[in-house]
Image: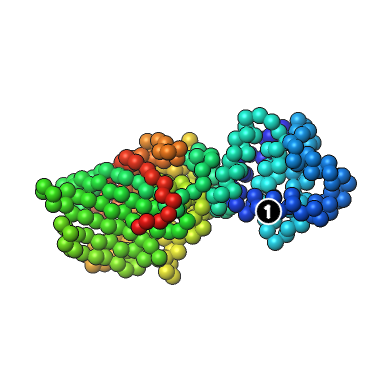
Amino acid sequence: MEAAGCLSALSIATSSARAIEIEHAADDDAEARAECCSQRNVPEDDTQRRADTGTNGDSEGDACAAIHDTSCFLAAHQEAAHDHWLTVTSVARLARLHNGDTNDEVSRFLRAVAGRHMNPHLPELVLRYLDRSLPPDESFPALVRVRQTGEMWQKPEARLTRFEAIEDCAVDRVAFSWRARFPLIGRLALTVVDEFRDGGGRMRLTLGGIPLRTQTGHDLAVGEAMRYLAELVWAPEAIASNRQVDWRRLDEATVEVTAPVGATSAVVRWEFDASGDMVRATGTRPFPIGKTFVPRPWGGDFGDFERFAGTRIPTVGEAWWDLPEGRFIYWRGRITAVERIASETY
């Protein structure tokens, strides 16, 4: 088996900034290096020479030696040496030992990862998706802002209402704000703000600046958190780095993502198509009926992937409820622009 095939780029994607820090610390720790070399009867200067100069990288034996060396170095730092971190830093050293465009790409990716604080516990399906979606050489922003146009329906068989909206999605925590304007007559418009932050959800309606209604409560909060999880597809940076959500593989084409909401959780399942894209989010969400909420099947479908500023996302989507009388599509929209915001401004 070729050395380059021993460890895939997907292993690299599981790295975190801490992984790179550990490797650097091990390289700088002469005492740890000497101990490892003595275990393998390898001269310390030879190990360091191969690590630093990128020589002798043509054989599987050299690659395996590099992996072993790195693992030895990190073994001296047991407080942080998780297995996948060992794998990642071994690949980093392996990349230095081999020449060629592929390894240049690996090195660039590793440098970018060092500043990204990526979640090290993502399923392989998600890692593969991120590998296709994220630009290789940029650090993560504080939030991702998407601009949308589309139409909504208040209830089945109702007349559609067009809207323009701006949505901010936090990258490192479960929080978003969707601000939509629905033109009515002339300059008169209905404004809707749908948001989740600090564990709570809120929806506000105003007409011409006059407040009409504000909704809060636990059921609404769960629904808003589910919306955040279902719209992560528009912010791959949040998929990669948000430690407030947990990911779990269900089968070869489905993962589950969970976020805490008070004493309960918001849970969404993501489905991947044959090409590895995240194309459908589903869950059981509280559905408003009068002043109460009833659990109903809910979801969204996404497609037409394009790149905005280097990040690949779906540009169209629709959201629906499966009601007793049939499927009700209540939201349909298109992404028109994406901004990566360095600091939170909402």
| Residue lying at 33% horizontally and 51% vertically, measured from the top left | 167
Q: Quadrant of the N terminus?
A: top right
Nearer-the-camera pick, 336 or 292: 336
Across and down, in percent, residue 274 comes to 48, 36
| Residue lying at 84% horizontally and 52% vertically, measured from the top left | 34
Left or right of 184: which side holds 93?
A: right
Across and down, in percent, residue 3 comes to 72, 35
| Residue lying at 35% horizontally and 68% vertically, measured from the top left | 218
Q: Amino acid at mark 1?
A: Ile
**Which image quadrant is residue 228 in?**
bottom left
Across and down, in percent, residue 43 comes to 87, 44
Nearer-the-camera pick, 185 or 255: 185
The furthest residue to the bottom: 263
Q: Quadrant of the C terminus?
A: bottom left
Nearer-the-camera pick, 75 or 8: 75
Q: Secondary structure at mark 1?
A: helix
Left or right of 201: which side holds 158?
A: left
Determine crowd level at label 1: few under 14, some 14-19, many 20+ residues with C-alpha closer than 10 A.
some
| Residue lying at 44% horizontally and 43% vertically, measured from the top left | 278
Left or right of 275: which side holds 314?
A: left
**Does residue 176 sit above or below 317 in this rendering?**
below
Across and down, in percent, residue 174 comes to 43, 59
**Does residue 270 sit above or below 202 in this rendering?**
above
Can residue 258 be seen in this snapshot? no
Nearer-the-camera pick, 35 or 214: 35
Left or right of 70: which side holds 172?
A: left
Colour scheme of this structure image?
Answer: rainbow
The furthest residue to the left: 185
**What is the tally of numbered marks visible in this picture?**
1
Q: Which residue is mark 1?
A: 22
Can residue 199 be seen in this snapshot? yes
